[in-house]
Image (cartoon, grey):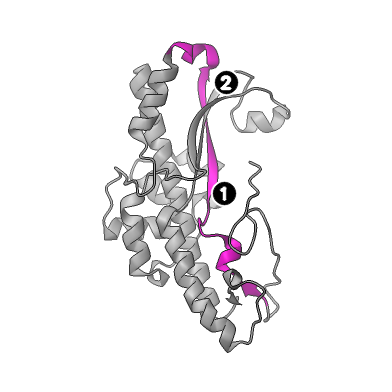
Amino acid sequence: LPDMHAGYGFAIGNVAAMDMADPNSVISPGGVGFDINCGVRVIRTNLFEKDILDYKEPLAQSMYDHIPVGVGSQGIVPTNPKILTDVLELGMDWSVREGYAWAEDKEHCEEYGRMMTADPSKVSTRAKKRGMPQLGTLGAGNHYGEIQVVDKIFDKRAANRMGIEEEGQVCIMIHCGSRGFGHQVATDALVEMDSACKRDNIVLNDKQLACARIHSEEGQNYLKGMACAANYAFANRSSMTFLARQAFSKIFKQTP
């Protein structure tokens, strides 16, 4: 998905490589981005365009009814502090355990849907409060949930690996990230790293790129909190995958 646009300090899509062995290497939340682990998920179906021609409007409405959208939207996935902690630590492993994902879904996900370095104790109460009601929500901005049709296959081998068999096949694409939770993780880290910059005499061209040495306490705390946000995003997209499957199941009166 080509996705290059203005961000905080970095443009979205920029990459900065750091040598982890260099004690002067830094990590910057602004460089990582505020919507941590924002990404897309393609869900292939066994349907083709001809199969849904008579169902376009009800399908779109069913998707809209099942997946909460908009600024401040709240999810229908039951969440409490204990559940949220499990989500932050386990990512898609939580989704599979609770029945919101299929075991094989993990095989098609980065990091198998879980970053092992996550440590929920490094995440603020404010971030957890923002994230708790938003699990399984799409949000707003450039995020979307679309029913799409394969128009052209350029690499048949790659398409087959993704279960896309031929042109005209119907897919669902979900674009979302870690919602308010990830934004708060980044915001909290920037406050800490502003102090770290002054302490370590790091001179910045842009305050939005406040950073800390990777191996400093601030740097390590951020990496552990960032992994929590990544796991939240994995579970968030998994929850919406579950809801999309339910939306299709309702219209076609078949199990996913």
Instruction: State yes or no: residue 63 in magenta.
Output: no
Q: Is residue 86 left or right of residue 149?
A: left
| Above or below, 216 relative to 239 | below
Q: Which residues are magenta?
A: 25-54
- Amino acid type, label 2: Gln
> Residue 6: x percent and y percent?
62, 54
Circle count: 2
- The residue sitting at 40% across, 68% down in the picture is 123
User: Is 114 located above or below residue 186 in the figure?
Assistant: above
Magenta-colored stretch includes residue 47: yes
Q: Position of residue 48 (x, y in %)?
A: 54, 16
The answer to whether any part of residue 255 appears in the image is: no
Q: Which mark is residue 150?
A: none
Q: Where does label 2 land, which residue?
A: 169
Question: At which x and y percent is residue 253?
Answer: 34, 18
Point out residue 156 in the picture as x, y percentages from the top left corner. Answer: 71, 27
| Neighbourhood count class around disc 2 (C-alpha, 10 Å): few under 14, some 14–19, many 20 upward | many
The residue closer to the viewer here, 109 or 50, is: 50
Q: Which residue is found at the position 48% from the left and 50% from the top?
A: 177
Under mark 1, the amino acid is Glu
Residue beneath the point at 66% across and 43% down: 2
44 on left or right of 12: left
Q: What residue appears at the point 68 percent right and 57 percent down from the top-left corner?
A: 14
Q: Disc 1 marks which residue?
A: 110
User: Is 49 located above or below residue 130 in the figure?
Assistant: above
Q: Is residue 70 above or below residue 173?
A: below
Q: Quadrant of the N terminus?
A: top right
**CA–CA distance in space, label 2 to label 1:** 24 Å
> Which quarter shows the C terminus?
top left
Of 208 and 146, the residue lying toward us = 208
Select label 2 or label 1 by which is in front.
2
**Mark 2 or mark 1, which has the lower sequence index?**
1
